[in-house]
Image (spheres, grey):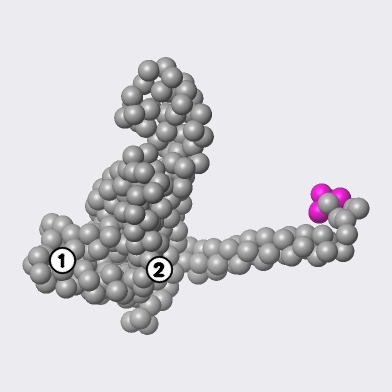
Amino acid sequence: MTNMLKSFKGKKLNDIILLLLVYGSAALSVTILVFIIGYILFNGVPHLKPSFFSISYDSTNVSVFPAIVNTLIMISIALAIAVPLGVFSAIYLVEYAKKTNKLVKVVRITAETLVGIPSIVYGLFGLLFFVTYLKWGVSLMAGSFTLAIMILPLVIRSTEESLKAVPDSFREGCFALGAGKLRTIYRIILPSAAYGILAGVILAVGKIVGETAALIYTSGTVAQIPDSVFGSGRTMALHIYALSSEGLHTNEAFATAVVLLIVVIGINALSALTAKKLSKESKH
């Protein structure tokens, strides 16, 4: 509060109004975030009990454990597909393709357009192509590939911007020491851009764990761990949707939201630690 008052001294009226808008917006954003998290924790934590994490799901115990396993499986498959494709595509666009290349402009426009497409459209595409045409059926694999297509533009754009943010002096210094193009990208550029790339991956994970519309048509809502990735299974977001729509297990839906929040925070923390480690290695 003292720092805020000091920032107002010697300011004009317009500057003070802008500062108030900035501080007000920040305070409002934090308040909303704290309220949402607090509301979820207040309604969900009291209903977290050991039986809620039992291996099997039945009508008397709507266990979240199968949904957790299914969610982690789909995150792993989707990221394994989208991250390498997205990173390599961004490397080509930034490091190899000429700035006047028309293909680069087409790819960028396409990626930006795909980010804004409603998820239900991806779900219908996954239903028609993966489920029906490829005959994978309603399965984790069909849902994972659909999610991979959804997050691919996000990974491409975030990686591309991160690579552009790396100073050209890094590249020039590495070339001056006799390093080749690939070695420069692998040892210098990618570690320097690790924070930005992993920030895009974190956003992609958030999109995966919060997705419901596309997965209803592709992965299904079976509340069990399938025998294989070609079996149907619901994620935690679908688990919340199913429980709340039924209206019989609202408390368990809030408890699932708490578990989902913990999983997302854990994944974000792991990504941040990985980025920090890569950044340290690049400095050495």
Residue 275 appears at what percent x and percent y? 45, 38
Name the amino acid type tagged 2: Gly
Nearer to the camera, 207 or 161: 161
SS at badge 1: helix
Q: Amino acid at mark 1?
A: Phe
What residue is pinned by disc 1?
130
Residue 242's disc is none
Dividing the picture into quarters, in which one does residue 73 lie?
A: bottom left
Name the quadrant of the N terminus. bottom right
Q: Is residue 141 magenta?
A: no
Q: In the picture, residue 178 is in which quadrant?
A: top left
Residue 224: in sight, yes or no?
A: no
The residues colored magenta run 1-6
Q: Residue at x 35, y 65 (%)?
A: 114
- 234 over 278 or under it: above or below: below
> Where does the image place residue 105, in percent across and percent down from the top left?
37, 56
The residue positioned farthest toward the front in the image shown: 100
Is residue 97 toward the left or the right of residue 269 in the image? left
Residue drawn at 32 percent across, 62 percent down: 150
Q: Which SS class for mark 2?
A: loop
Residue name at image x 82 percent, y 49 percent? 3
Label 2 – label 1 distance at C-alpha: 22 Å
Label 2 Cα crowd, 10 Å radius (few <14 / some 14-19 / many 20+): few
What residue did someone put label 2 on?
116
Depicted 33 relative to depicted 7: above or below: below
